[in-house]
Image (tube, rainbow, N blue to C red):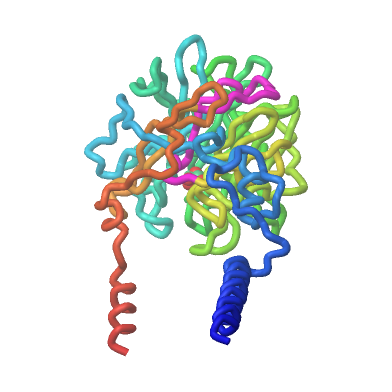
Amino acid sequence: MNALKFVLNKVFFVLVLLTTCSSCKTEQKPNTSNHQESFPFMLPDEKPNRPLSAAMKRLYDDYPAPKPENNELFSQFKYTPLKGFKYGNHDGTISRRDPSKVILHNGTYYVWYTYRHTPTPPQGAAKSNDTIPSSDWDLSEIWYATSTDGFTWKEQGVAIKRPKKPLVGWRSVTTTDILKWEGKYYLYYQGFMEASGKRGDDCPVAVSYADSPDGPWTPYNKIVIPNGDQGAWDQYSIHDPYPLVYQGKIYLYYKSDTGVAPHWIRMQGLAIGDNPLGPFSKHPLNPVISSGHETSMFPFKDGIAALVYKDGNEHNTIQYAKDGVNFEIASITELMPYAAAPYISDAFSNTSDGRGITWGLSHFINLGGHNKFHSMLVRFDCDLSQDLHDPEMKRHRVKHDTTVYFKQGLSTNQIERIKNAHSN
Ligand code: AAL
């Protein structure tokens, strides 16, 4: 009897053991009849053939490369002060800003920019008069400078003076850009007919032309890019004219301030023409970029790339349009150059293989604070070029000093709000 009992106990023990193991085996693996391999440890260079989340689809479908270091349209930006420009004692009476693209002519770099030299810093529209500027770019002229290395510049003086009233630009000629077309040079610029700030920053675009980048410049004295119709997004301001030669035509990008201060929306438009003196046709899909501030584009491969900074949902992005019109985000970056004016070797060559950019000029504004407001030109360097691979420019993040974060401190209103929230 004892032997039978012993055997039965053993059999029962084995049965319990098998049941437990098999259940623990099933417990180890939930019912995953549709078992999906985990995403691989090493990020695949090519889009993997597997179900992907929206973020991972975007990583492969929307960006030129899944990693910033391999993305030709991602870059950090580095800044260098320029030599050769004087700003008085930075009292706000001398300002340089909104540089043009840089061109190379007979081994010398040229740049044009807004130059203001007034008896006082800007005083606002209400206090402005024939000598007191309303804004940093009021009562200004277009000046130019040359350089052999892009770091040290020699100021050459005025290129475009303010014309006599009532000609376009009599109040101020500002924010210029350069086009070379069939051997001649054209400077497009904002032509103010009233002090900026009276209603808004309202102006059309005018143009002057010359046989040499050293001038003399002949004003066309007509508006070439008119304001939009009443109620149109660009009815009041046509800013930052920015011509490139693309698909055999002049692609003139520009910005407009839409909406009502202080809730401005800045967006970018495009006008296309065959003749530098016009007419230009505004693209039916305008605005072609929903964000940004000054226009900064360059031919890249068979399309156009854009530096989009400062304002709007898509600020701090570098964008790309294979057709020069329908822009998509190619990368997200930071510390972007404002009023970026690159040196673009193929800006006017009607290229279908744009090489990209590695440097240019831009500006820092609001030097001297509200009472001494003025701006200065600076140089930026980057790697947005098919012909350069600078790993330092492809680092994912900019390492800011702690002072940068603490300078970005809470306002008194915010401190008050937080205190009240705690006390309630
Ligand atoms: C700049 C540009 C235009 C505006 C003002 C001067 O950044 O957008 O030129 O009119 O600000």
Of the pair 69 and 162, the residue shown nearer to us: 69
Residue 181, compared with residue 89, is above or below; it is above
Q: What residue sits 56% from the left and 52% below the top? A: 314
Q: In the figure, is residue 95 to the left or right of 185?
A: left
Q: Please tell me whether residue 338 belongs to the stretch shown in magenta.
A: yes
Residues rendered magenta in the picture: 333-357
User: How far from the left and from the top, in percent, is residue 128?
Assistant: 39, 53
Q: What residue sits 33% from the left and 73% below the top? A: 414
| Residue 125 seen | yes
Residue 264, compared with residue 215, is above or below; it is below
Q: In the figure, is residue 315 to the left or right of 154?
A: right
Which quadrant would residue 21 be assigned to in this image? bottom right
| Residue 191 seen | no
Dividing the image into 4 quarters, which one contains the N terminus? bottom right
Residue 200, compared with residue 101, is above or below; it is below
Please name the predominant secondary structure of the magenta segment in the image: loop
Dividing the image into 4 quarters, which one contains the C terminus? bottom left
User: How far from the left and from the top, in percent, is residue 324?
Assistant: 70, 37
Of the pair 46 and 319, the residue shown nearer to us: 46
User: How far from the left and from the top, in percent, is residue 271?
Assistant: 70, 39
Which quadrant would residue 78 be assigned to in this image? top left
As drawn, the residue found furthest toward the bottom would be 424
Q: What residue sits 28% from the left and 87% below the top? A: 423
Q: Please tell me whether residue 349 belongs to the stretch shown in magenta.
A: yes
As drawn, the residue found furthest toward the top would be 106
Residue 270, compared with residue 5, is above or below; it is above
Q: What residue sits 46% from the left and 18% below the top? A: 109
User: How far from the left and from the top, in percent, is residue 239?
Assistant: 57, 44
Q: How many marks?
A: 0
Of the pair 370 and 57, the residue shown nearer to us: 57
Which quadrant would residue 221 be assigned to in this image? top right
